[in-house]
Amino acid sequence: MPTTKRAWLYVKRNRKRTALLFVLLTVLLAVSLAGLALHAASTEAVRLLRESIGGYCTIHTGADGREKTDEALLAQLKTLDHIRGYNGVDTYYLYAEGLALVPACWHGSGTVDEFTPRLIGCTDSSLHERFVSSSFQLVEGSPIGPDDHGKALISKDVAALNGLTVGDTVRADARPGVHDWPDGTAGVQVEYEIAGIYAVTRSEPVQPATPERDLQENIIFTDIQTAKELAAVKFPQRAAGEYVYSSGIMLFVDDPAKMEETVAYLRQQSFADWDSLLVFENSATYQQAAAPIRKASAISLFLLVVILAVSVVILSLTLLLWTRERVTEIGILIAIGVPSKGIFLQMLLETGLTAIPAFAVSLLLGAALCGGIGGAVGGALGPVRLGAAQAAAVLGCAAVVIFLTVLIAAVSILRKKPREILADLS
């Protein structure tokens, strides 16, 4: 009788065993499929997170002041590998007469400090650390880009105090007593069109002696071109390439998970004296966001390993017990000349005939489990889908596990000679 026919007859005649093996394989395969889909989804989520969350480092002039964070340095930095974005930041102050600021210690004094906000010139306002960290959120208008001129972002609080909206203008000028503006620049005026309005989403502690300019609600973001024009008036002795980003240069890296390697690569560049520059790494946002996803990925991988080990143990024990009950049958097959390889192939086919429909059903069950997992995590990982790659991987692993378990179950009997099997029966 052909091996395939013997295998089919065994499966057909032993329905209880076949049903039990079918249920066992279906559950193990479905859980494996869902676990692998979860692992794939978490891996993809981490990859997308690396692309969407800007891990960055900020470069500042050191205490000795020898190396400046100027235009020349930025020109070199933005050409480097592993850098996907940059933001030059320059903080300056102007007198904004008539612009009501959120009150602080100078309120009602009538001094210039009462109407002096902090202005921050940015290459790209959306890349400023306040927006990257979500401390500020743009609620109206658009961010300021490198090609903008005469543009500003103001807080929702200042806009409400002054009845301002997107498209309105804010005027400011340089005056003696406004920080370090020299007397010769008095009367220098600038006009900003409001490009957007931001909301402060995180509070900061305020002391009684805190001036208006240090309140986060009183920050005005401006375009970098206007900041450069004002710097040229303030420091006429500087050449265009010597424009200094007083609050540093932010460099956004390709992969925030490799921040240390990128900074080490940065320090190897010969165009700057890195001993005179301070480099601060900031990948906290990425690390905080990635931590739960990595945990889910690690848990899913651990579960896959456990499921694989449990599958081998359970299937091995089950098939071993069933094989020992078939000693008489195996002894007869050997006695009539069926080789050990043929008997092993028959047992493998028996399990395979049950595993194939079990795998088909497990695909449906696994897809349902993926949907449940996706709903349970609330979309934190994105859609948890069962793809062809996961199905193929589980099918391959299942084939290996079935082969090993059948081999483990059969080898203890197949290695015996017919005489030894008959002796065991007696």
Image (tube, grey):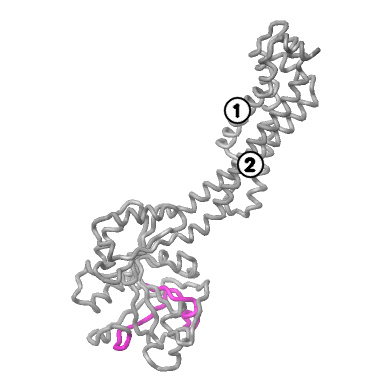
Q: Nearer the viewer, residue 419 or 132?
A: 419
Quadrant position of the N terminus in the picture: top right
- Label 2, residues with CA under 10 Å away: few <14, some 14-19, many ≥20: many
Q: Which mark is residue 267?
A: none
Residue 351 sits inside the magenta stretch:
no
Q: Which residue is mark 2?
A: 34
Q: Which mark is residue 400?
A: 1
SS of the residue at dot 2? Answer: helix
Q: Is residue 142 depicted above or below 111 in this figure? A: above
Percent position of residue 235, x then y: 23, 77
Nearer to us of marks 2 and 1 is 1
Quote the CA–CA distance across marks 2 and 1.
Answer: 19 Å
Residue at 49 percent across and 82 percent down: it is 206
Give yes or no for contact between labels 2 and 1 (Cβ–Cβ under 8 Å): no
Q: Nearer the viewer, residue 56 or 199?
A: 56
**What residue span does the magenta drawing correspond to?**
151-178
Percent position of residue 314, x then y: 70, 32
- Label 1, residues with CA under 10 Å away: few <14, some 14-19, many ≥20: few
